[in-house]
Image (cartoon, helix red, strand yellow):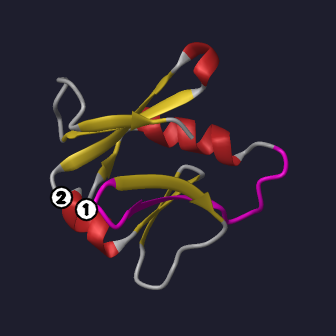
Amino acid sequence: MVTITDQALSAISVLLAQDGVPAGTGLRISTDPHRRLRLSFTPQPRAGDSVIDRDGARVFVEPDAAQALLGRALDAEAGGTSGVHFAVCRQFDTGPPVVPSFPP
């Protein structure tokens, strides 16, 4: 299973706490037909999704994405005027992201 860094948990919590976001909404990590990772906010997990619920942050991980994310960590950093940038890195690695960052 993917590890969610404290920075990513904090960013997800802030995004989910915004006005108009329905209760129970979470960040869903899935794959597209080309097996690229996708991030989206969705009101509930889909059948088969793993659910991570910690400190006000809910993350739903699709089974194919869970396989792709073994040994990886979801991280986040403030992007200044462009919001939050998410990145998937090797777990416990401070090097460059494995995949490009995803703005929300």
Q: Is mark 2 on a helix, strand or loop?
A: loop
Residue displayed at 61% across by 72% down: 44
Instruction: Give amino acid for label 2.
Output: Leu
Residue 10 position, x and y percent, is 53, 37
Residue 26 visible here: no
Q: Crowding at label 2, few (<14), some or many (≥20) Cα neighbours within 10 Å? A: few
> Closer to the N terminus: mark 2 or mark 1?
1
Question: Which residue is under mark 2?
Answer: 70
What quarter of the picture does the C terminus occupy? top right
Question: Which residue is under mark 1?
Answer: 1
Q: 17 or 99: which is nearer to us?
A: 99
The outermost residue toward the front is 34
The outermost residue toward the top is 80
Residue displayed at 38% across by 70% down: 62
Q: 11 or 41: which is nearer to us?
A: 41
Q: Crowding at label 1, few (<14), some or many (≥20) Cα neighbours within 10 Å? A: some
What quarter of the picture does the N terminus occupy? bottom left
Label at residue 31: none
Q: What stretch is highlighted in magenta?
A: 19-36
Can you tell which quarter of the image residue 38 is in?
A: bottom left
Q: Is 8 on the left-hand or right-hand side of 24?
A: left
Q: In the picture shown, does residue 20 fall above or below 94?
A: below
Q: Marks 2/1: CA distance? A: 5 Å
Residue displayed at 35% across by 54% down: 37
Which secondary structure class fits the magenta region best? loop
The answer to whether residue 26 is magenta is yes
Q: Is mark 1 on a helix, strand or loop?
A: loop
